Structure formats: C-alpha cells, structure tokens
C-alpha cells in the first residue's frame, strides 16, 4: 500500500521556486534576449513569453520590472518612460514568477559593453548581498533596520549610494503575509525594529528577500541584485 506523497516544506518549496527563477534568468541570457535596440517593454514581454513557454509561468506576483540606462537609478515603485536599451547600457531585471503558488523574487544586473565601472557594479552588488546574508546567518537577533543600515553602508564603502529606502521584504506562498494598513513592518528599512527571525502570527518562521540597489547618480546608472535571504548558504 502506497502512502500519500510527502509535501515539500515551506523552505523546500521556496528554494525550488528560486532555482526555477535562476534557470529562467540563465535562459534569458542564453537566448540573447538582453540586447541593444529593444525597448524595456518589449524585453519584458519577451521574457514573459519565454517564462510561459519554457517554465509554465502564467502569473507573476508583482509587476515585471526591466530597467536600462538612467532608469536603473529608479526603483520598483517608479514608472518611468519606456526606454530603448543602448549599446553600452546597464540593464536590470526584477521578476516575481509564481511556481506552483510559491513566490520567487529574483533580480540581476547585466552590462552591455566594456565600461569597467559598470562591470564593477555587478560584482559589488553581488558581494554586498553575500555579506548581508552572512550577517543574517551570524546574528540571531538581527533586525530589519540593522540589516538595511549595514547594506547601505556597504554601498558607501564601495563608492556607491544605496538606491532605495528599503532593502527587501517578506516572501512565501502566494499571497504572502500582509500587515493591515501599512507594509512597513514587513520591509527591510531603516529603524524597523522587527527581528528577521521573529515568527509569524501562526508561529511559523518568516522568510525574507534581500534587495541590493547601488547607484552612481553622477554617471546616471545603477544595479540591482535580489534573492532569498533566509534560505540557502551565504
């Protein structure tokens, strides 16, 4: 007699969703979708089509974000004019595909051309994410506010500016836990006293996304990197 199949844990489901998002982004690169001459809106639509055809993604739990050039200074909440990717541009992608009702939230930055400062940015934001995750793993009482201040300081040390008033948020089964009235308690922002390991109302662990957004306002470009903070190695 065969028993019921074992359902994945929350941690397993979120990790699996992120792996699928990683595979989607690898496919985006391998198929050459990120290229000069295409509008941000066109690239977004092409990625959406690729995600549907290759990975069965029908829905995204937040709007699809494609930014290039000076638009990379902006955040998720901005709505800039559609811009065409140039031959020496920085491009960042921020997508939230749903895999079997589990949310992924994945962001990466790509550089067209050989500008060394832009390529340095890609390395610096990845390094800052790793350091932020190492801090989370090392400090059991870490608060959202302390983590925000830490990654903001990393931007300054590396010669950048942190580009957003938040550096992450909750994630989970769609739709994830919300705070009635304001989302502020569940965002990684300055002065937020919530402990990242504080359980939810049902006593279950909360899971967080860490977002790194470094910008160079003088040269009018920025970069973005995000993935799971609370699951997986540093």
Image: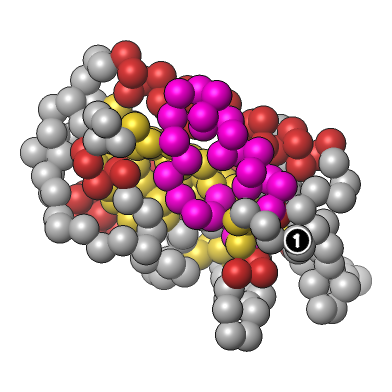
Q: Which residues are magenta?
A: 145-170
Q: Residue furthest bottom?
A: 180
Tell me residue 176's x, y (percent).
Answer: 62, 73
Q: In the image, what residue occupies the spot 21% across and 20% down? A: 113
226 relative to 217 in the view: left or right: right
Dot 1, how many residues are within 10 Å of its Cα: few (below 14), some (14-19), or many (20+)?
Answer: some
Q: Nearer the viewer, residue 62 or 22?
A: 62
Secondary structure category for the residue under label 1 = loop
Q: Quadrant of the N terminus?
A: bottom right
Q: Nearer the viewer, residue 195 or 224?
A: 195
Where residue 125 appears, as percent x and y from the top left, is: 50, 31
Q: Is residue 81 above or below residue 215?
A: below
Q: Is residue 218 magenta?
A: no
Q: Which residue is mark 1?
A: 193
Compared across the picture, whether 52 is left or right of 141 comes to left
The residue at the point 74 percent across, 33 percent down is 134
Quarter of the picture containing the C terminus is top right
How far across and down, in percent of the image, does residue 84 sit? 11, 44
Is residue 150 shown in magenta? yes
Quadrant assignment, res 136: top right
The answer to whether residue 156 of the structure is visible from this angle is: yes
The answer to which image quadrant residue 193 occupies is: bottom right
Report x, y in % for residue 204. Answer: 84, 69
Left or right of 179: which side holds 104? left
Residue at position x 56%, y 39% in the image? 152
């Amino acid at each position: 007699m065969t028993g019921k199949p074992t359902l994945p844990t929350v941690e397993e489901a979120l990790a699996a969703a992120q792996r699928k998002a990683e595979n989607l982004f690898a496919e985006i690169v391998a198929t050459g979708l990120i290229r000069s001459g295409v509008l941000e809106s066109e690239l977004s639509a092409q990625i959406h089509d690729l995600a549907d055809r290759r990975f069965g993604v029908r829905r995204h739990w937040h709007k699809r974000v494609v930014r290039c050039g000076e638009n990379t200074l902006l955040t998720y909440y901005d709505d800039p004019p559609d811009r065409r990717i140039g031959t020496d541009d920085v491009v960042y992608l921020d997508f939230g595909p749903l895999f079997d009702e589990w949310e992924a939230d994945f962001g990466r930055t790509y550089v067209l051309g050989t500008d060394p400062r832009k390529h340095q940015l890609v390395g610096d934001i990845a390094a800052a994410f790793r350091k932020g995750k190492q801090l989370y793993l090392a400090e059991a009482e870490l608060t959202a506010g302390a983590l925000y201040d830490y990654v903001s300081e990393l931007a300054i040390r590396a010669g950048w500016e942190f580009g957003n008033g938040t550096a992450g948020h909750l994630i989970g089964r769609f739709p994830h836990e919300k705070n009635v009235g304001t989302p502020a308690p569940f965002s990684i922002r300055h002065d937020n006293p919530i402990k990242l390991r504080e359980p939810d109302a049902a006593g279950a662990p909360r899971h967080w996304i860490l977002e790194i957004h470094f910008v160079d306002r003088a040269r009018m470009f920025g970069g973005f990197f995000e993935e799971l903070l609370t699951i997986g190695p540093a």
